[in-house]
Amino acid sequence: MLARLVDSVWVFDDSKFGIWEQPFVFGSDLILEKMVAGVDEELDCVNILFSSIPFPGSEHWLKFVREETEGFVYRWEDEKLQGWLSPALRNYYPQPPPKIYLQLLPIG
């Protein structure tokens, strides 16, 4: 999944599912902003690799909290932040996984 800044808003694209400029909102934008800030360079575009199981290179993980308004609330325990993930998550998982493991790869 490609995440990028568009007019100061983090959005994601996934051509496989016809998703273009889907915004990260309701806290997920803040989570992504903090994760990106942890990378050694200033970024406005990253590839996000994610899985329901840990994988080599996964740097972060989010814990499922609840379903809400057709989407899913996850918590980033390291920073005590919660964020909403859109129903597009169902493109990847039929049910929300208990944890999502992430790695951010700079594009440059």
Image: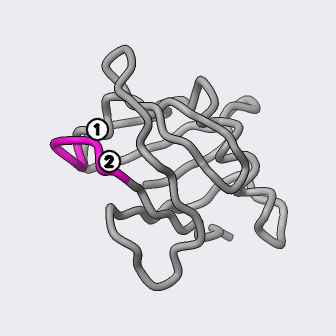
Look at the picture and state if 55 lies above or below 74.
below
Report the quarter where the C terminus lies.
bottom right
In the image shown, does 2 or 96 lie closer to the viewer? 96
- Residue in the picture at 63% in, 30% down: 27
Q: Residue at x 44, y 36 (%)?
A: 65
Local secondary structure at mark 1 = loop
For residue 95, side relative to residue 20 (left or right): left
Residue 107 location (% of width, % of height)? 63, 67
Q: Is residue 29 left or right of residue 12?
A: right
> Closest to the observer: 53 or 4?
53
User: With 60 as the anchor, is 13 left or right in this view?
Assistant: left
* Residue 90 to residue 36: above or below: above
Instruction: Residue at the far top: name it.
Output: 69
* Residue picked out by circle 1: 18
Image quarter where the N terminus lies is bottom left
What is the spatial separation of the Cα atoms under label 2 and label 1, in whole angstroms?
Answer: 5 Å
Checking the image for residue 15, the label placed there is: 2
Q: Residues within 10 Å of mark 1 (few under 14, many from 20)?
A: few
Q: Are marks 2 and 1 in contact (CB under 8 Å)?
A: yes
Asked if the magenta segment contains residue 94, the reply would be yes
Q: Please name the amino acid that badge 1 sits on.
A: Gly
- Amino acid type, callout 2: Ser
